[in-house]
Amino acid sequence: MAKPPLMSELAASGNTPEILFWVGCAGSFDDRYKSVTLSVINILEKVGIKYAVLGQEESCTGDPARRAGNDFAFQMLAINNIQILDAYQVKKIVTACPHCFNTLKNEYPALGGHYEVIHHSQFIQQLLQEGKLKVEGGEFKGKKIVYHDSCYLGRANDIYEAPRSIIEALDADLVEMKRSKAKGLCCGAGGGQMFKEPEKGAKDINIERTEEAIDTGAEVIAVGCPFCMTMMSDGVKNKEKEGKIRVYDLAELVVKNG
Amino acid sequence: MIAQLIFIICLALTIFFATKSVKRIVRNIGLGKKLDLSGNTSERIKKVVLIALGQKKMFARPIPALLHLFIYAGFLIVNIEMVEIVLDGILGTHRLFAPSLGGFYTFIVNVFEFFAVAVIVVCILFLIRRNVLNIGRFHKPELKKWPLLDANIILIAEIALMFAFLNMNAIDQILQAKGNPHFHTTGSLIFSNVFIPLYSFASENGLLIAERFYWWFHILGVFLFANYLPYSKHLHVILAFPNTYYSKLNVVGEINNMPEVTKEVKLMLNLPVENSLPSTEPLRFGAKDATDLTWKNLLDAYSCTECGRCTSVCPANLTGKVLSPRKIMMDTRDRVEEIGNNIDKNGAFVEDGKALYSDEYISKEELLACTTCNACVEECPININPLDIIVQLRRYMVMEESKAPGQWNNMFSNLENNFAPWKFAPSDRFNWADKLND
């Protein structure tokens, strides 16, 4: 696979890509989620769309700062990002992180940043619908896959069908947890929880959610969010089910399916 | 004549005290910060029709929704009867509309009676659900003492009012049958008929007294209940409508921008500052007390009927953390009431050393437990937003008090220095692509 084109290089040669792939901090630094980034790159390359990434010019969107109550930190990052995005005249952004997605889409406009923002699940769904990407009948055919809704994709932005349509396209057996879609239970990492120990309680939220996923009898827990990925993977580890259940991102499912 | 006079005095007192309560609540809600929610009228009316009037979100839980619908419809429909009762009270007439409406009168009173019976049945079921069955959301710590009593008072009052209404109609029919000229025929009222045998032993005089007793019990009960509402969680019967009207139109994922911060950040970054940004520094960033919240947050608090659907889906609460979104709303209302009473007593607010963000009301531990997952917001049948309050209190805790937990402070400094929440060098951000070929 080729190294993804950088926005700065394209701009220097007078090119503007159709989409900017917003990698996000987890996609850049988290060892597990880097694989998701590579899967998205794989898909982008496969369909031959003109895209670019920001590379070192990208910063955190500020989501965890805003939700933890630090709007100074949020706005410093957001305003800086908007300056860069606008300098490159970015119009359309695809991201594999629902937190980046929500912030870029819903919170940057108030600071003057207006972009068409698409979550990678929607992007893949579009490619499948347009026939640009084909996935049916591969490794996951007939396998039981449970989709865990990310709060920032689901309730926060009403996106429930795009992720499920991908799993269905794989000819997999899509199953639902008791609490799904608008009633989906949080993985426990949102609102800044990813970056601190949980408050004292009877149980960790990700354990509660993982148990629910395990109860479905699925072989794969599909996620579309880096925080959910961490929380569900930790949950599966905690339950010593690593041999039986794998946690995959939607883009990974598509790429692994071959 | 004396009865009419007493009635008019009671009605006047009811209106006087109710008006006072309305003024108090409007004033208290107005203690919140300004927030412009004007415009988008048609979209907002649609929300009211679907969510408040149509109870769309209630039906996510069909059984309580159906039961609630009976009380709700009963409340709306049986109250039409109040027009006649009040006019009778003022004019000294008896069943003013019976002669002119004829058969339609029989029909409409039968409809009222059907709903009266439905209300009694459902209120009994609700009393059982709340007090006997083990339904988690009715047994949380914040629902002890007054909130529990409040809920039971409402249910018992509704049963008593409907019971009086039905018995009044039953006795009326007995007196009609006896040919008492004061009692114009109503036609057969099929639900109150059931109560007729109860009075088979009574003399005509006794029946006349009993009929008046139930009539007065019912109407004075209604008057009292109307004045109880403003102090009760039951206020939702009115405030659900404005509250859904003013509910958030954008997706719930959006957390409001703080323009006062934007100005400071732009100055720091040497960027041009638009004139539209607020020019005066706010008293404080975020919210410490109820009056730092917006008027919509306070309207939310007054609209809450403490059903606890929010708490029953809160991931923090489900896993044993102290956070309960319902308690956030109850605390907000209690505190703004306290501030309102303080103002009434002293003419202007006199510092009482208390605040909404404090161990007495909403504690730091509660705020820190929230995952901002929006489950509470999604669940509320009338679009109350506890998360909006939590975020504003967090803003105060973090930006004014600088009391974020240590791990959050590390995250903030990583964001400031490395532009990522983790401690990685910004120059390493693109290293993930290293293993790809150039």
Image (tube, coloured by chain):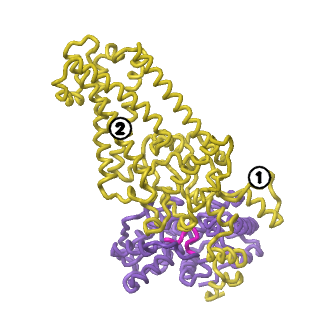
Compared to residue B50, the image places residue B98 above or below, namely above
Q: Any idea which chain is the yellow one in this picture? A: B
- Magenta stretch: residue A189 in it? yes
Q: Secondary structure at mark 1?
A: loop
Image mark for residue B384: none
Residue B135 in view of the camera = yes
Mark in front: 2 vs 1: 2
On the same chain, marks 2 and 1? The answer is yes
Q: Residue at x 64, y 58 (%)?
A: B288
Relative depth, front residue between B374 and A252: B374
Compared to residue B374, the image places residue A34 above or below, namely below
Q: Secondary structure at mark 2?
A: helix
Crowding at mark 2 (Cα within 10 Å: few <14, some 14-19, many 20+): many
What subunit carries mark 1? B
Compared to residue B311, the image places residue B169 above or below, namely above
Relative depth, front residue between B141 and A196: B141
Q: Residue at x 34, y 72 (%)?
A: A216
Relative depth, front residue between A231 and B308: B308
Compared to residue B355, the image places residue A120 above or below, namely below
Crowding at mark 1 (Cα within 10 Å: few <14, some 14-19, many 20+): some
Of the residues shown, which amino acid type is indicated by label 2?
Glu
Pointer 1 residue: B278
Q: Residue at x 77, y 75 (%)?
A: A12
Q: Quadrant of residue B113?
A: top left
Whether residue B173 sits left or right of residue B220 in the image: it is left
Pointer 2 residue: B158
Range of residues picked out in magenta? A188-194
Quarter of the image with the N terminus of chain A is bottom right
Q: Position of residue A149 (x, y in %)?
A: 46, 67
Q: Quadrant of residue B203?
A: top left
- Magenta stretch: residue A163 in it? no
